[in-house]
Amino acid sequence: MTSEKSNKTVKVIQKRVFDIFTLELRDDGILHIHLSNEKEYTLVGIKEVNLLIGEMVNYTPLPVLMSADDFVVFPEGAREMNAKKNTFPYSKAVAYLAKTPAHQLIVSFYINNNKPERPTKMFETEEDALKWLKTFL
């Protein structure tokens, strides 16, 4: 990825895949978590994902970019669980990249009703999401 303003290419310095989660630690200090729709999203693997994230980020909270394939369905209880700071303790702030109307509706409901315990915003473009996340570096 190249930013037009800085012409700096951002590199992934570490990548791990667990179940439907692809975790990419970028050299700009942002962790990108992408959810795949290849399997059903369940809450069972959250503990294991947190262990991987902790190892990747040296147990230090970082800004997180969250994205998902278009047809990812969020399981019951996911909004309530993800709103708690201790569910993802290594996230300093979370930017949700929501490109589909369905994801925009879900994320908007999550932010307004579940009131996440960390700074959380929704964006339609990756550029805007990253700009906001960089204020937490």
Image (tube, helix red, strand yellow):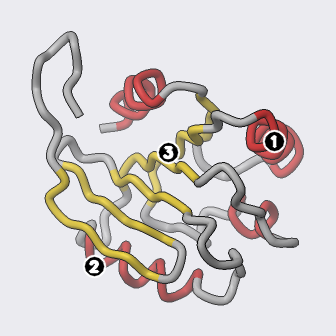
Q: Earlier in the sequence, mark 3 or mark 2?
A: 2
What is the tally of numbered marks visible in this picture? Answer: 3
Q: Quadrant of residue 134?
A: top left
Q: Earlier in the sequence, mark 1 or mark 3?
A: 3
Q: Residue placed at 48% from the left, 58% from the top?
A: 34
As displayed, is residue 54 above or below residue 99? below
Q: Nearer the viewer, mark 2 or mark 1?
A: 1
Q: Residue placed at 48% from the left, 88% from the top?
A: 48
Q: Which image quarter holds the N terminus?
A: top left
- Disc 2: which residue: 55
Label 3, secondary structure: give it.
strand
Residue 11 at x, y percent in the picture: 15, 46
Q: Between residues 120 and 32, which one lies in front from this camera angle?
A: 32
Q: Quadrant of residue 57?
A: bottom left
Q: Amino acid at mark 1?
A: Ala
Label number found at residue 62: none
Q: Amino acid at mark 3?
A: Ala
Label 2, secondary structure: give it.
helix
Q: Residue placed at 26% from the left, 72% from the top?
A: 56
Q: Nearer the viewer, mark 1 or mark 3?
A: 1
Label number found at residue 93: 3
Q: Are marks 1 and 3 in contact (CB under 8 Å)?
A: no
Q: Are marks 3 and 2 in contact (CB under 8 Å)?
A: no
Residue 76 at x, y percent in the picture: 87, 72
Q: How far apart are the alpha carbons under marks 2 and 1?
A: 33 Å
Q: Between residues 88 and 11, which one lies in front from this camera angle?
A: 11
- Disc 1: which residue: 102
Q: Earlier in the sequence, mark 2 or mark 1?
A: 2
Using residue 12 as the reference point, say whether residue 88 is left or right of it.
Answer: right
Q: How far apart are the alpha carbons under marks 1 and 3?
A: 22 Å
Q: Residues within 10 Å of mark 3 (few under 14, many from 20)?
A: many
Q: Amino acid at mark 2?
A: Glu
